[in-house]
Amino acid sequence: MKYTVGLGDMLASFSPKGYERFLQANEFDITYTGAEANVLGSLSCFGLDTRFVCRIPENDIGTAAIRHLNGMGIDTKYVVRGGKRLGVLYLEKGASQRPSKVIYDRLGSGICEAVPADFDFEKIFEGAGWFHFTGITPALSDTTPDVIKEACIAAKKAGCTISCDLNYRKNLWTSEKAKTIMEPLLEYVDVLIANEEDVEKVLGIKAEGSDVENATLNHDGYIAVAKQLCEKFNLKAVATTLRESISASDNNWSALLYTDGKAYISKKYMIHIVNRVGGGDSFSAGLIYAMQMNKDPQETVEFAAAASCLKHTIEYDYNLVSVAEVEALMKGSGNGRVQR
Amino acid sequence: MKYTVGLGDMLASFSPKGYERFLQANEFDITYTGAEANVLGSLSCFGLDTRFVCRIPENDIGTAAIRHLNGMGIDTKYVVRGGKRLGVLYLEKGASQRPSKVIYDRLGSGICEAVPADFDFEKIFEGAGWFHFTGITPALSDTTPDVIKEACIAAKKAGCTISCDLNYRKNLWTSEKAKTIMEPLLEYVDVLIANEEDVEKVLGIKAEGSDVENATLNHDGYIAVAKQLCEKFNLKAVATTLRESISASDNNWSALLYTDGKAYISKKYMIHIVNRVGGGDSFSAGLIYAMQMNKDPQETVEFAAAASCLKHTIEYDYNLVSVAEVEALMKGSGNGRVQR
Amino acid sequence: MKYTVGLGDMLASFSPKGYERFLQANEFDITYTGAEANVLGSLSCFGLDTRFVCRIPENDIGTAAIRHLNGMGIDTKYVVRGGKRLGVLYLEKGASQRPSKVIYDRLGSGICEAVPADFDFEKIFEGAGWFHFTGITPALSDTTPDVIKEACIAAKKAGCTISCDLNYRKNLWTSEKAKTIMEPLLEYVDVLIANEEDVEKVLGIKAEGSDVENATLNHDGYIAVAKQLCEKFNLKAVATTLRESISASDNNWSALLYTDGKAYISKKYMIHIVNRVGGGDSFSAGLIYAMQMNKDPQETVEFAAAASCLKHTIEYDYNLVSVAEVEALMKGSGNGRVQR
Amino acid sequence: MKYTVGLGDMLASFSPKGYERFLQANEFDITYTGAEANVLGSLSCFGLDTRFVCRIPENDIGTAAIRHLNGMGIDTKYVVRGGKRLGVLYLEKGASQRPSKVIYDRLGSGICEAVPADFDFEKIFEGAGWFHFTGITPALSDTTPDVIKEACIAAKKAGCTISCDLNYRKNLWTSEKAKTIMEPLLEYVDVLIANEEDVEKVLGIKAEGSDVENATLNHDGYIAVAKQLCEKFNLKAVATTLRESISASDNNWSALLYTDGKAYISKKYMIHIVNRVGGGDSFSAGLIYAMQMNKDPQETVEFAAAASCLKHTIEYDYNLVSVAEVEALMKGSGNGRVQR
Amino acid sequence: MKYTVGLGDMLASFSPKGYERFLQANEFDITYTGAEANVLGSLSCFGLDTRFVCRIPENDIGTAAIRHLNGMGIDTKYVVRGGKRLGVLYLEKGASQRPSKVIYDRLGSGICEAVPADFDFEKIFEGAGWFHFTGITPALSDTTPDVIKEACIAAKKAGCTISCDLNYRKNLWTSEKAKTIMEPLLEYVDVLIANEEDVEKVLGIKAEGSDVENATLNHDGYIAVAKQLCEKFNLKAVATTLRESISASDNNWSALLYTDGKAYISKKYMIHIVNRVGGGDSFSAGLIYAMQMNKDPQETVEFAAAASCLKHTIEYDYNLVSVAEVEALMKGSGNGRVQR
Amino acid sequence: MKYTVGLGDMLASFSPKGYERFLQANEFDITYTGAEANVLGSLSCFGLDTRFVCRIPENDIGTAAIRHLNGMGIDTKYVVRGGKRLGVLYLEKGASQRPSKVIYDRLGSGICEAVPADFDFEKIFEGAGWFHFTGITPALSDTTPDVIKEACIAAKKAGCTISCDLNYRKNLWTSEKAKTIMEPLLEYVDVLIANEEDVEKVLGIKAEGSDVENATLNHDGYIAVAKQLCEKFNLKAVATTLRESISASDNNWSALLYTDGKAYISKKYMIHIVNRVGGGDSFSAGLIYAMQMNKDPQETVEFAAAASCLKHTIEYDYNLVSVAEVEALMKGSGNGRVQR
């Protein structure tokens, strides 16, 4: 099986114990995370070979981040050491009517100052079959769009399929800037993962009839959007998760895949949430795995939806589930009987 | 903004980790709590200046309690040091069909032996605009009713509005004794917070048609009671929370405010509970804040209900939420989407 | 009150904190457990005198297991020290669509090599009124069926009622072997606890119309099975729990008792689960307690159902609830109001 | 082997994690302790049968204390349930130049209101061979001296040897009161454990040439005192520990036994302290064990010194060591090589 | 008593549990710290009124830092909210031959962008009697030297004594830059705290005969340096700690105060270290307290040395000791006997 | 740089928190360990490429062990999945006079049933330059000696240097059996690591004049032994650690290397111990690293001694130190000054 390569930022993620608020926390759990690394971690649990590319500072916290990736089974041979700091994020877990809260402190992290010359993309994509990136990386600095662009060119040359999770973050850039940067990058992309908000904010394409805040979802509107995207950017597939937020504790969850002019919608799961961070990344991973396994579109969206459903029951950012566990949920009733 | 003053007892509150029972706990979380202190802590999070008055023993556990109050931003300049012990309470968190359990061990705590002469009420109420007390304090000993009475007189003299949370505790005194003590104190009170059980047990006024145990609530009955109370004690307002206990894990929650001859009922929240301790105190705080901000009655009861809804999602006794967070819930859908 | 005796295996049970998966756990909670010990622990909380019989290795881990039993108030005077190891089990707690997972590592534990001569059954059953065992013990090795048989003979001689929880475990033996071993032992049994799966797998008797995996339960089918069992094995009573698994977080729970030719079904509880391990054992304990107290059949099944409902709200394997707490749930609304 | 009986108070002991001070602690470890219970716990680890007598309140915290004793293997059949509260103590562990700190909050604990009639001493001492009490119990209230006196009378009648650890606590009573109460009780005592400070403060007998504060110890002075004590109270033996406090982290430790007109001094241990609480109680236990085993005086004092040396390496109050471990230290070099 | 004012940076300090290394840590303790805040925290424990001035970002982590200061009893009314981030430091505790390790990540923290106009120094120094700053603050950015200069001018105007801890940090600036910035600021300083390395690196004045790395200390050399400093900068006093590092676990500790042309050297303490972070700050606090109390020079240096000796026995950065505890060590033997 | 290969067993290692004893522990830290894996983990921290070979069961606990190795940077591509269980060990950390205690429960672990055919040694040693094994592996079962033999043959063929740590464990086999098995394997060995006890027990060669139990070490005796070993088995080098156990808390530590007919002795370190487990393995790693780096003998033994000195200051089994940290200790004073 060929490597899946991801390129993006790494952060030290600090979260208070249980449901404690920042104001009362004296202890924090630490994990090392990043959207692309989360995707690779999940793929690694599915048994794929994965390779992560980043620029990480040369200190013990940076080394700890790398060891964490190794502990997920991710190859880090091509991680470049450099930069002044590892970015930090603070995550407070919400419950019921109280939303989760994320405070980013990623100013000047290693990847922000990276330039294409830092990476030997030819070697990086040796033996690679898939390249995944997200819209977060080009948003981080003025040099990162070029890094992604060069990576895409090398990936294409190596014969990779390229997936992109649009992942719009309003505190990183404006819609206008996002559009200017992302549109040219989408030329290289085969598979786009993007929810309605992403598409509207980054690409200016709006689905009619949905109201994200109020958890009403309009499949038809989204399908129309997906069709437009496929045509405009010559995409092989567009996918999105369909989250209905009932509260910070309970969500409904399904997914939609549009490919070859048709839409495929998964089963819907009613989830009692343990930790929803990384839900989107685990969906990307499910999708990438299923597509690499050449599953048919319905199976693909079911696999990705089931995988990401399970993520919501797992602590921290990585989706530590096996293919067997995902398939058991796809085929079973999700009734949670003890496995002995 | 003028100070809000609270006077009452402080306790060391020990609770086992998570859902452990007393019988299996080897570690306890400690927090320092008290009904009035909880109210002030919440007001302090709303940005108000607060002052707590108590009598706390001169040892490190007592000092820790004071530091805890300071850490909530509460002024403790007028806490008197003295007495033999800080009271203790043991709290076991319930779940589903298993109720939470509180064991009080507050015999002979500092405030129990306090007398009016221990406090310089004139100075205490300098710059104060509101005074809050609960029915717990006069119940604690034979000297505390006098302390509260002198505090009320000084507060009135300083121009304070006075609020009282009736908070009847059957293990502290009988209905008869409560009535004898509380009725004269209510002469000083402007705003009364009291649920049906409190009113019935302390003041002997019963709402028809409700069954607290079985979570059926009768708004009309309570409104009639509130009317009676306003007339009898010349109150500016009467307020109550309306809790429907479905289980120790799930409650419905709303609130009712009666003022100027009219009743105002808040939105109802379906809460998946993290910790319900301090729910009533957070409601008092929401009410006191909104009234000091001169919000209209509907906004007032909505603010108090939303604030205390959020308390149920927060660990330990204090309602660590900001005004912005309360308002987001009042105006939003409470769908718990991540805030980045 | 006479002793209740239990005989079975003990294991060190390691479980990650909260909802962590094995793959991410750096700390494990340890408890010492076993189906029969769990039953005795619960009976001991109900105030009965209990005695546990086992063979436990002569090292500090073995001693810790015994101390744990003592700490539950269980008499361990007749625990035999010997064998190479204490068995181990690893328990990962599930949530929502992710099931709990148990990995057994009990190969060659102390009881496996036990022979009847290791135990002085005459003394063990001195003063005993009830003997309980489960189908796990005879499944553990070639010598344990004889141990159970000799225990049953001695128990009968001492005038004990004998209960057996069939507890079929497919990773310990085949249906065929289970049938061969268990049928002769059932000759000694008065009270059989067995769910549909147990009965079908061990005794080859199938209830029509139920689908355990999909949480549809067919009372009539089970009653027919119970009737057959009572007749075939001359049983005084047959009982079963009726679990509807909605997810790993939510279950419906009730119970059925068949005795004297009639079936008694308990109230149904909708449980938000803290920890479901030991649910079946807590039901056995409730049943044994109620029958020893000579409660009528309906009260008996209600007591056992309420007791085991509460188990689901308690961490680890033992049902740390008092008779008063069980009765409060039986008679109350289970609305979980705080007990002060 | 006959039972060893202890009678005294039980407390919930709360201590911050590691070396945290009270002022910074958010979590406390809890253990349930008492001087006499500590002695019994240690004897139980040595394999003796032990019985603890106390009056403990009828609530879950009281029950947890009893379960804790059971978990040490101590028989609690004769613990009386009653009283308003379980006493509390707060323990802060010192290090280097910072001393450990204990805050007692034991006012009105169960035993304080106990009277002789609460206990059926005849039954309690059935099968007993030894009775142990400390000077703390008679100091707790006006009724406890009578309880101890009646216990002594019954113990003597049952043929017990009686040991007393003088254990003077200046915050419980004055020297004068201690003398008045303790002297008559010493009439029943066979073995007295008392350090120089105890003897001076309680009995007014002063050893020349020692300075406890400055860790200079004068064996000859103490031997003279012991001689006097034996003669005055017709004692079989007097024993003391010899602690040289270098810092809160390092102590030298040995012991002295005076019996039959001769003094026996143990080996001296240089201890790097884990937790010194319960050091004296573990010495009493070592002494009681060795005397019951009829070891000769030198072996007795060596056993008691080695046992209590090991206590300093163990967390919390109980000396969880076996006879084999004590003997290995007595005979070995104490070099701490790993035992595999 | 007049206020003591401190101005400087605040950081979130993350440290792994116990002696874990960064590479293996999954949990971090958090505390909020800063050299000047540490000094104020200690003074607050001594009972002085303190006021902290800083610029702290407007997010929950910033608010948590402020609440932490409040919980130490420090007034934060004049903390300005602003800036992009709270700086971070990672602290790994060393042991024996393995040194402690600090990784700073303070780039662009709130104070770095502060300018004099952010602060209303007239109000800040109202009622103040002492102002303390360290050499860290002017090293942080190009604007902070001006902030400190304006603060000094206002402090002098308000009649404050000014103390400065030179605290040279080689990773913040070069010796040359430090000299250029610090020399003009020393014009305002009355009391200088500086060890040999600080003086050499910042002011270019070298003591002969010492070797800091090898723990040989040369009092005469330092006294000569102190004399020079007093003359050159017209100082009232110069003080330094004298640390002999034997290992990360054991240090010898004493202090030297030079004032009025004479040198005063304290007692020397052999410390078994719990946590040495903040040792220097606790010395500054001891000095500032003793000087404000008008103790004579010998008493002053003894108080400061004893206070900072105790800091080494306390977890995290703040010296949570009372005046009574410091005096007990000054006057006692430091033998660490339990205080009951 | 070429790979270093290790082959041996893996165990789940459970240890109570801090200094808790097994009898009181409710939580255990878990790590996954094994003598050879520890050596590789250390080499990986030194920056070498490492490969671990083992047979590990196909369940989540086995997978967690592999992930743990990956997290150390160790290549596990050639770990074979199979067998019934992962072995377990329980480790209780000693202090002062109380020794650490290890309880092994490794019966029937994956490697025990391994046969040479399970491993593709040709591939395993592709690109390898060094092979390390210990005397534990051949002791585990009847098939493991053959596995080691085949590995040695393949390693030699691939041009590897082979090192063996004799590591005699009396609870695994007798001296006689050890001799029979180990002598033929030593034919393949180039570098032997063995302390006096190992050599005496396994090879029957005794050094005169030492007494391991009493921490007197006789260098001359050991040198004579090393000479004999080199000659008999045609070894390139023999090395040993020289541990003087003062107590479980304090050890002196140095090392001796015999090569080319000469002995080289390292500096001696006085260590205050955090955790001594893995001390020997970290010495092997230091030796293997230094020899691969072609350091001269004195530097080699200094590097290995310093590396393993640092291990004693680190929690759990792996020596998480860098080459720079080892060299800093070799060249510095070990005075433990904070590194900022």
Image (cartoon, coloured by chain):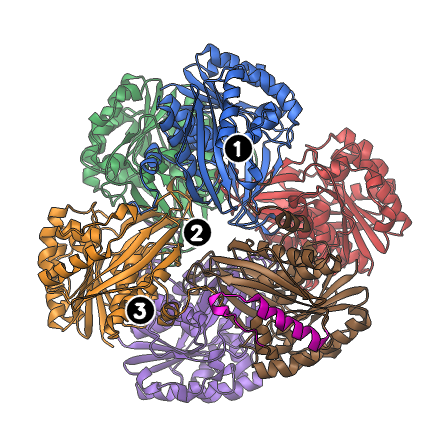
Chain colours: A red, B green, C purple, D orange, E blue, F brown
Q: Which mark is residue F82?
A: none
- For mark 3, does the 10 Å Cα neighbourhood hold few (<14), some (14 to 19), or many (20 or more) residues? many
Q: Nearer the viewer, residue A267 or A320?
A: A320
Left or right: E295 with respect to E255?
A: left
Residue ID for mark 2: B17
Q: Which stretch is magenta?
A: F206-234
Q: Between marks 3 and 1, how big is the CA–CA gap? A: 56 Å
Q: Quadrant of the N terminus of chain D?
A: bottom left
Q: Is residue F230 magenta?
A: yes
Q: Quadrant of residue C54?
A: bottom left
Element under disc 3: helix
In the rendered image of this protein, does residue F144 appear above or below residue B109?
below
Kind of residue indicated by mark 2: Lys
- Residue displayed at 49% across by 85% down: C182
Give the foreground label among 3 and 1: 3
Q: Chain of mark 2?
A: B
N-terminal-most mark, 2 or 1: 2
On the image, the x and y values in percent for residue E202 come to 60, 25
Query: Residue D44 got which mark?
Result: 3
Specify the principal SS of the magenta part: helix
Considering the numbered disc 2 on the image, is that residue within a helix, a strand or a loop?
A: loop
Please give the chain letter of the residue carrying mark 3: D
Q: In the image, which disc is placed on residue B325?
A: 1
Q: Is residue E323 left or right of residue A72?
A: left
Nearer to us: label 2 or label 1: 2
The x, y position of residue E297, in whole percent, is: 38, 24
**Observer-nearest residue: F175 or B203?**
F175
Percent coordinates x, y for residue E233 in the rendering: 53, 16
Q: Classify mark 1: residues with Cα within 10 Å, few (<14), some (14-19) or many (20+).
A: some
Circle 1: residue type:
Glu
Residue at the top extreme of this rendering: E157
Q: Are marks 2 and 1 on the same chain?
A: yes
